[in-house]
Amino acid sequence: MEERPFTSSLLEEAVTELSRLPGVGRKTALRLALHLLRRDERETDNLSRALSRLRHEVRYCRQCHNISETELCPVCSSPLRDSRIVCVVENVKDVMSIENTSSFNGVYHVLGGLISPVDGIGPDSLEIASLVERVAAGGVDEIILALSATMEGDTTNYYIYRRLASHPVKITQLARGVSVGNEIEYTDEITLGRSLINRIPFNDSFRQ
């Protein structure tokens, strides 16, 4: 059935932009746009202002590549965090998932993805070189590989392990309380926390 044109070009423009969001079709976008029209103008203005500030003022931490509003994120700059233990994760959502467990007091390194040749993502597309530089600079005792238990995650784990093999740093990974095929962000907090606490040496994972 052919879609009828909107009676307002401004409404159509808003629907078009909202429908660009992940998981938002045009029907949902229309419902959201009409909802915003019904709300107080201040609420819509606040949303617009928050999105504009998010896009223009948020940056990435120069050390761990987590989202931040300053050059160093609050985790990296906190004197209460153990900077000798670095937890390597795929993305910012994984940082949030691990922080929600309250089981980790170290710092992070966000790769920005996983190695996936099928998708054209190689090691040079990720923040792996900066991780190696971080370890080579000294002050890091342990690297925790907290990547999803998928083929891409395992491939990335092994690549990082090989890159760091010549450095005197302990390399561990999450215990397999995280089921094979699971992504970190969808793992419940209790399981994730226990997997982090009970982490194992990485080389044990492929000697068994």
Image (cartoon, helix red, strand yellow):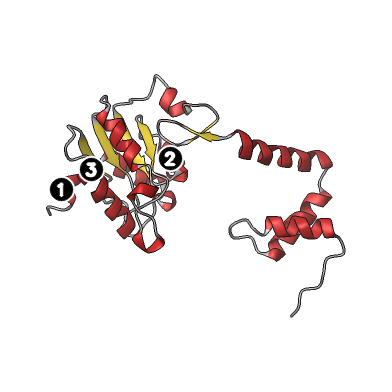
Q: Which mark is residue 95?
A: 2
SS class of the residue under badge 3? Answer: helix
Q: Residues within 10 Å of mark 1 (few under 14, many from 20)?
A: few
> Image point 35% across, 48% down: which residue?
124
Tag nearer the camera, 1 or 3: 3
Whole-Å distance between the Cαs marked 1 and 3?
A: 17 Å
Q: Amino acid at mark 2?
A: Val
State if disc 3 and disc 1 touch (CB < 8 Å). no
State if disc 1 and disc 2 touch (CB < 8 Å). no
Furthest-bottom residue in view? 1
Say whether disc 1 or disc 3 marks the residue closer to the N-terminus: 3
Which residue is disc 1 drawn over?
Answer: 204
Percent of width and height locating residue 15: 74, 59
Figure quadrant of residue 89: top left
Which residue is disc 3 drawn over?
Answer: 163
Residue 28 versus residue 90 in the image, above or below:
below
Q: Amino acid at mark 1?
A: Asp
Q: Residues within 10 Å of mark 2 (few under 14, many from 20)?
A: many
> Image point 74% across, 38% down: which residue?
46
Tag nearer the camera, 3 or 2: 3
SS class of the residue under badge 2? Answer: helix
